[in-house]
Amino acid sequence: SSPSHALQQSFVECFSSYSSPQSIPISKVVFTNESASFSSLLHQSIRNLRFLNTSSKPLFLVTPFHESHVQAAVVCAKKKGLQLRVRSGGHDYEGLSYLSSQSQFIVLDLTNLRSIDVDIETETASVETGATLGEFYYRIAEKSLIHGFPAGSCPTVGVGGHISGGGFGTLFRKHGLAADKVIDAKIVDFNGRIMDRNTMGEELFWAIRGGGGASFGVILSWKLKLVSLPPKLTIFHVQKTPKQGAMQLFQKWQRIAYKLDEDLFLHVTIGVQEQTISLSFVALFLGPIEKLIPLMNTQFPELGLQRENYTEMNWIQSILFFAGFPIQTPPQILLKKPLSNAFFKAKSDFVTYPIPQNGLEGLWNKVLEEEGSYLILTPYGGKMSQISELETPFPHRKGNIFGIQYMVSWENGSESYKHLSWIREVYAYMEPYVSKDPRGAYLNYRDLDLGRNYGRNVRYEEAKVWGLKYYKSNFERLVRVKTKVDPSNFFWNEQSIPTSLYRS
Ligand code: FDA
């Protein structure tokens, strides 16, 4: 038999001897790349079609039903010299949860570890990392319509990658990041040991709340603090073209959005409609219409909002709205995981001073010339300015007025090169207008253009180039944690935290 066949066999033997006896047969947990369901299992959580038909295929897919399966996968991968990739929701922008530049690797897909236990009395929840945000939100709303959780807008995002990378959404000006609400976690380390906050210690617990879980171990579950919310929330959504004063409105927005009441989240998306630039001003207010109207009339009357622009709803309906569903849609839709149908590439920036008009005009022209491109501009301030940038590895707090996500998506794989070139050009164009020394980037909008590791012997100096962008001065502390908890760099990937071993 082929060498990889022999390796597969010895991995399976190792796996059976390490995982504690279960009623589940191993054939339902470990799939070799020759098994019939391998492709459909692998593809079900690939969100970016750019990575669907690559030659990088794992030798195995392991889908644990029990914690001991995770332990066995770690121990046996290490023993057999296989790399491990961990996948929760599979939304990684560069596919790092299921691809590897090394040929012999396995994917640990947590899809079967998705239990969610919401306790309204203590306002906490235990969430296994195979769960999606949509499932979590649904389970909260099932028990209470006046509780929520401050995390991202896309319901199919997994809680494993999202929370360990920061995680922001419409509640973050009031309540901070998803990572700010973690009160405990369970993690499997490189020796296959299970640890909680108490046994892992505060340094590792700090690192996995924004430093990315994949560098440190396999996170099994989170214990999270819920937030209480008013029964009535209000949204509005208005679109403006340049003829309708979009430039003046944007100029005002970038000067006030981060200073608005922290109950008000007002973001802008910029795209193209009928061959012209179109700005969408979309807001979520944590309160009823009666309170929002006077606020908008004093703070931003230029938007010209009328009473009919406002809609009141509860929190779970606001989740449906920001996920792009009509608010009357039964929330069960949040439990679904549709297959992806888009190729995309994204990048991120942080803005610390308002962008001058000529800079904006150039940016809008670039959006106009590229089909499928759009920008999402998210106001900071509020709670985000009150939390120290050292509190978690996510450093983009005070001083940022808004974040930018540049996005381009397309349907025809043969056009990839053109779209990738476009987004790189826009990123270069924006340099004078965004944060500097380092130019900030958001880990959860992973971007391998910033730099990458080329093997397990990750060089500290090279990793620092992109590390400072994601974590600023927290990078050094992440390196110290990594060196302590995973000195052999078993949990390695193309953008994992280096150990200090290869520091020149
Ligand atoms: P995936 O499973 O791909 O994992 C991402 C990374 O985390 C990988 O390195 C993986 O190995 C690691 N990982 C996953 N589970 C782990 C575990 N249990 N233990 C250790 N490591 C683990 N972000 C945001 O802040 N706000 C938003 O509103 C959105 N919206 C959004 C929409 C869409 C359509 C996409 C594709 C993405 C977003 N994001 C976002 C970005 C999102 O937060 C980011 O891609 C997350 O890392 C995705 O987490 P998943 O678990 O889905 O990804």
Image (spheres, grey):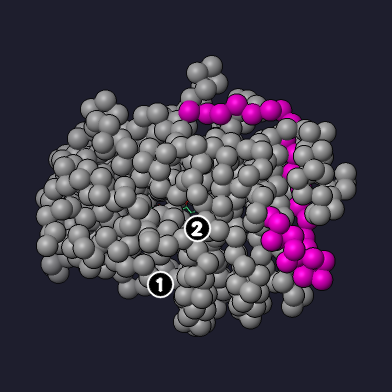
Q: How many neighbours does mark 2 have within 10 angstroms: few (below 14), some (14-19), or many (20 or more)?
A: many
474 lies left or right of 349: left
Q: Amino acid at mark 2?
A: Phe
Q: Does dot 2 land on a helix, a strand or a loop?
A: strand
Along the line of sight, the residue nearer the viewer: 103 or 60: 103
259 lies left or right of 161: right
Res 354 quadrant in image: bottom right
- Return the residue found at the far right: 307
Which quadrant of the rendered structure holds the N terminus?
A: bottom left
Where does residue 115 sit, x and y in percent of width and height?
44, 33
Which quadrant of the rendered structure holds the C terminus?
A: bottom left
The region drawn magenta spans 225-253
Task: Name the residue rendered at 38%, 55% in the picture.
Answer: 470
11 lies left or right of 359: left
Q: Is residue 152 above or below residue 37?
A: above
Q: Is residue 410 above or below residue 110?
A: below
- Mark 2 Cβ inside 8 Å of ligand 1: no
Along the line of sight, the residue nearer the viewer: 140 or 198: 198
Task: Name the residue rendered at 16%, 47% in the picture.
Answer: 483
Res 411 quadrant in image: bottom right
Q: CA distance from mark 2 to mark 1?
A: 33 Å
Where does residue 306 sit, x and y in percent of width and height?
88, 48
Task: Name the residue rendered at 66%, 65% in the picture.
Answer: 270
- Name the mark nearer the viewer: 2 or 1: 2
Res 362 quadrant in image: bottom right
- Identify residue for label 1: 53
- Return the residue found at the far top: 121
Q: How many neighbours does mark 1 have within 10 angstroms: few (below 14), some (14-19), or many (20 or more)?
A: few
Q: Amino acid at mark 1?
A: Asn
Along the line of sight, the residue nearer the viewer: 435 or 176: 435
Q: Which circle marks residue 350 in the picture?
A: 2
Task: Name the residue rendered at 58%, 32% in the picture.
Answer: 148
